[in-house]
Image (spheres, coloured by chain):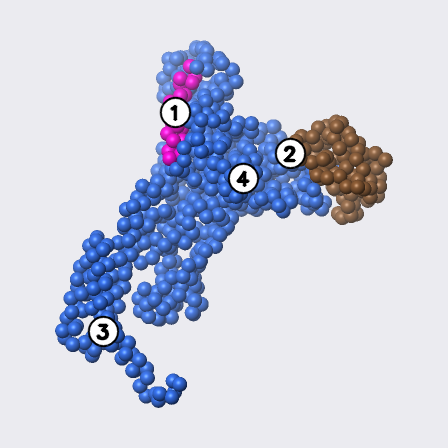
Amino acid sequence: MSITMTQRAAEHVRKSLAQRGKGEGLRLGVRTSGCSGKAYVLEFADSIQPDDQVFENHGVKVIVDRKSLMFLDGTELDYGKEGLNEGFKFSNPNVKGECGCGESFTV
Amino acid sequence: MALLQISEPGQSTAPHHHRLAVGIDLGTTNSLVACVRSGIADTLPDGEGRHLLPSVVRYLKGSAPVVGDAALAAAAEDPLNTIASVKRMMGRGIEDVKRLGGALPYEFAPGESGMPRIRTAAGLWSPVEVSAEILRSLKRRAEATLGGDLTGAVITVPAYFDDAQRQATKDAGRLAGLTVLRLLNEPTAAAVAYGLDKKAEGVFAIYDLGGGTFDISILRLNRGVFEVLATAGDSALGGDDMDHALADWMLRQAGVEVSADPHGARRALRDARAAKHALSQGEEAAVRVTRPDGSVWQGRLTRDEFQALVDPIIERTVAPCRRVLRDAGITASDISEVVLVGGSTRMPRVRERATAVFGRTPLTDIDPDRVVAIGAAIQADVLAGNKPRDEMLLLDVIPLSLGIEIMGGMVEKIIARNSTIPIAKAQDFTTFKDGQTAMAIHVVQGERELVSDCRSLARFDLRGIPPMVAGAGRIRVTFQIDADGLLSVSAQEQTSGVASSVVVKPSYGLSDAEIERMLRDSIAHAHEDNDARNLREQQVEADRVLAAVESALVADGTALLSPAERQEIEQALSRLRSLRDGTDVARIRDGIGALDRATREFAARRMNEGINKALAGHRLDEFG
C-alpha cells in the first residue's frame, strides 16, 4: 500500500503548512458524495488517529485513514497549473470513471 | 482532472460546492484581487502575470469598455473617455466633484439624487458604474483563476469613508455581480494580513502612502475588535508627486520648457518613474531626456540627490502622523506595531522617516501594494465559511456617532461612535405638544451636541400618531447598522403601532477633510458644546412649561383663579419668557422654578376640578 507525492506537491504542502503555523501534515481521504459517487478529501491534519496510515514523501507526511486507503492505494498527488488556475491533482489507479470535472469519481 | 486546494480539517466542500471568496482592494490608482488557496493568501495575477490592475476605465463608442493597463495607456490621447481616480468621486455630490475639479478633466452631468454622471462617447456613467467595471474585471480574473463562480467578496474602503461612500462602494460591487460579504477598512485589512488580529490587544499605526493619496490610521485591537482611534492624511499626496518632482528636475537639467512640450513631459514622467523604482534598489540611476529638437541630455542621479528632490514631499506625511497621535490621545511609544502600505513605502527614505516618527521598525515583509487585498482575502475566507467556527470573526466599528434631532436643535445620540457593528439600538421618545399627530425624525451623524454642527443624513416623518396630551405618546426609534456600517432607522408609536422607516441613503457629499474636522471639532468644542446643550435643554424645558401654563390659563384661568392670583402667574410667565431668550442657564432654571411655585395652587385646583368632573353623576359605591 502506498501513496506518493511529487516534489512540486510536497513543496507546496510545506509552504501551506508553514503559512498556517501548525499541522502534522496533509490528510487525504475519500468520502461518499458528489455527482459520480465518491469525492476526494484534501485537508490539513492537526492530529494522527489510531487507524491512520502515514506515508512520508519528500519530508511531508501524508495521512490516510484505513478505509479511504482502499480507494486511494497507488495514488500520486501532483501540483500543477492549468491556465491561471493552480492546485493539486490526484492520479488514482483505482478510478473507473470520473465526472466531467474530475472532482468526484467511481471505483 | 480538477485542481484541488487544501481545506481546514473538516471543512472540505462537496464537489462543485467550493466556497470561493476573494478580497478586493479597490484603490484610487490600482486595484487588486486576492484569495486564500491551500491556506496561503495571495493576490491573483492576470494572464500576463500582472497583479495590479490600474483603476482606469475607457469607454468606447459601440464596444465594451476597456479596463486596466490598456485604458491607462490611452489616458493621454483620449482623456475625456478615460476615467481614472474614480474612487475620489464615489458617494460624492456633483458640487463636491466639481470642487475636486481642476484635477479631473471630465464633463459632468447631474444625475438622480445628486449623483454626478460622467459624459463619455458611450453615454453617461456614474462613479458607481465606473467602479463596477473595475470590479467586474477583477471578478472575471478571479473566476478564471479559481475555476468557478465566486461565493462572495470582501471589498476594502478607507477608514474615513462615510456612509454615502460605503454605500456607493457596495452598490458598485452588487452592480458587478458580486455578493459583497462585507466592506472592510483598509488599515484593518493591512493589520489582518500581518496577523495582528491574532494578538490579544495592541495599538497599531498603518502608514499608507500610495500613488496619489496618503492615509495614516491608528487602530486599537481590543478583544478581537479593531477600533479606529483616529485617521488623518492628505488626499493629494503620493508617489505621483515624486514622479513629477523628478521629471521636472530632469527637464530643467535638459533645459526643456515643460509647457512647450507636453508629449516630452509625459515621456519624462514615465522615465522618472522607472528611475525612482531603480533607486529603491540601487544607489544610482541613469536618466535621459530627448529634447524637442531631437538632441539628448543624459545624466546620472544618485539616491542622495533623488532624496533631496523628494524629501519635501515625504516630509508632508510627518505632520498628519503627529496629528493622528494627538487625536488618538497617545504617544509614539504606545504604538506596538507600524505597518507600511502602498507602493511608495518601498522607498528606503520613506521607511526611514516612518521609523523615525514612530520610533520603531515597521513591518514590511508583505508586498505593500498587495497587503490590503491579502488581508481582505483572509477575511473573505473566514466569512465564506472555510474556517472552523472558533476562528474569531473580525469586528468593525462605526466611525461617527449616529442620532436624531430632538427639541431645541439638540442631538440625542442613539449609537455612539466606535460601537461595534452590526448593532441595533432603540430609544423611546415622546410627544412635545398636546394633540401632536406627527413627528419629524431627523437622522444626524457626528460628535457635536447641536444639530447645526453635525451632518444631516436623512429626514422622515412619522404620521398618524393618535392625539394625546403632551408626553403621553411613546415613539420608539430604532437604529440598525448592518455589518457594512449601513444604517436603517425606524420609528413606531407604541400604543397605535403606526410606523415609518428609512434606509439611509445618506445625502451625498462630505470630504475626508470634513469628516476629520468633525471629529477634531468635537474634541476642541467639548466644553462649549456642553454649555450650549445645557442652555438648549433649559430653553426647551422653559418652552414646555410656558406652553402648559398658557393653555391651562386659557382653559381654567377665569374659573379657578382670582384676578390677583392670575396676575401673579402672568408675571412669572412673562419673566420666564424674557429669561428664556437669554444665555444664563441658572437664571432660566430659576425662572422655571418660580413659575412652578406660582402655579402650584392653580395646578392643585385643576386636579381637584378634574376629579370632581370625573366623579360627578356617579355614586360612591360605583368606585368601591
Residue kind at label 1, given as amino acid type = Glu
Name the residue rendered at 34%, 42% in the picture.
Answer: B523
Callout 2 crowding tier (Cα within 10 Å): few <14, some 14–19, many ≥20: few
Tell me the number on the disc at residue B278. none
Disc number for residue B200: 4
The picture places residue B218, in percent across and down from the top left corner, at 44, 36
Chain for disc number 2? A
Up the image or down, B382 lies above or below B558; here it is above
Q: Are marks 3 and 2 on the same chain?
A: no
Mark 2 — residue?
Answer: A21
| Residue A87 pos. (x, y %) | 70, 34
Q: Amino acid at mark 3?
A: Phe
The boundaries of the magenta stretch are B305-326
Label 2 residue SS: loop
Please name the residue that numbered disc 3 is placed on.
Answer: B602
> Looking at the rendering, which quadrant does residue A71 occupy?
top right
Residue B84 coordinates in the image, percent (x, y): 46, 34
Q: Are marks 1 and 3 on the same chain?
A: yes
Few, some or many C-alpha atoms within 10 Å of disc 4 (few <14, some 14-19, many ≥20)? few
The amino acid on which the numbered mark 4 sits, given as a three-letter code, is: Ala
Q: Are the residues at dot 3 and dot 2 in contact (C-beta closer than 8 Å)?
A: no
Colour chain B is painted in: blue
The residue mark sitting in front, 2 or 4, is 4
